[in-house]
Amino acid sequence: MELNALMHKPLGSYLKARRIAAGLTQHDVSSQLGYSTPQFVSNFERGLCSPPLNALPVLVRLYGMNPEELIGLILRYQEQILRQALLVDKKRTVRRARKAN
């Protein structure tokens, strides 16, 4: 699975909660982002994709978020994903080396 794909669901859930807290519909947000249907917003809220980088400043403004909060969330999830991938790979390598000896 693509590394970034593992982060879509937590980010989508977070953004959905923020949208709802801001009192906005998916249609409201998609219009502000220049999309004709709310499907785009639905897709990233369901974890099928992440919003493009150029949409993040608009979402921060619309949802009244602190940009540092969003940056921190993204970095924490990326770090968890990287650590998991690297530690799993490291454990497999160690096991293979032990079996070979």
Image (spheres, grey):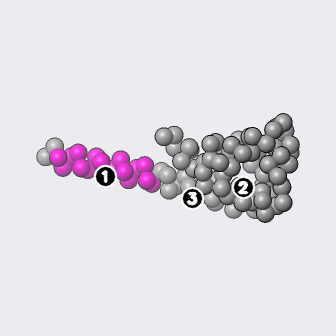
Q: Could you say which quadrant of the image residue 72 lies in? A: bottom right
Q: Nearer the viewer, residue 46 or 8?
A: 46
Q: Quick check: is 44 in the magenta stretch?
A: no
Q: Which residue type does callout 2 highlight?
A: Lys
**Local secondary structure at mark 1:** helix
Pointer 2 or 1: first along the chain = 2
Who's the residue at 50% across and 56% down the image?
80
Q: Residues within 10 Å of mark 2 (few under 14, many from 20)?
A: many
Residue type highlighted by circle 3: Arg
Say which mark, if any, is on residue 91. Answer: 1
The reply, left or right, for residue 87 in relation to residue 61 is: left
Q: Earlier in the sequence, mark 1 or mark 3?
A: 3
Left or right: residue 77 compared with residue 32: left
Q: Nearer the viewer, mark 2 or mark 3?
A: 2
Residue 1 at what x, y percent from top left? 48, 40
In the rendered image, residue 90 lying in the magenta stretch gets the answer yes
**Crowd around label 3: few <14 · some 14–19 · many ≥20 (10 Å):** few
Q: Which residue is mark 3?
A: 76
Find the magenta span and give its range: 83-99
Check the image and name the residue furthest to the top.
Answer: 36
Q: Earlier in the sequence, mark 2 or mark 3?
A: 2
Q: Nearer the viewer, residue 48 or 6?
A: 48
| Disc 2: which residue | 16
Disc 2, SS: helix
Q: Provide residue 31's location: percent of width, then percent of height.
A: 86, 43
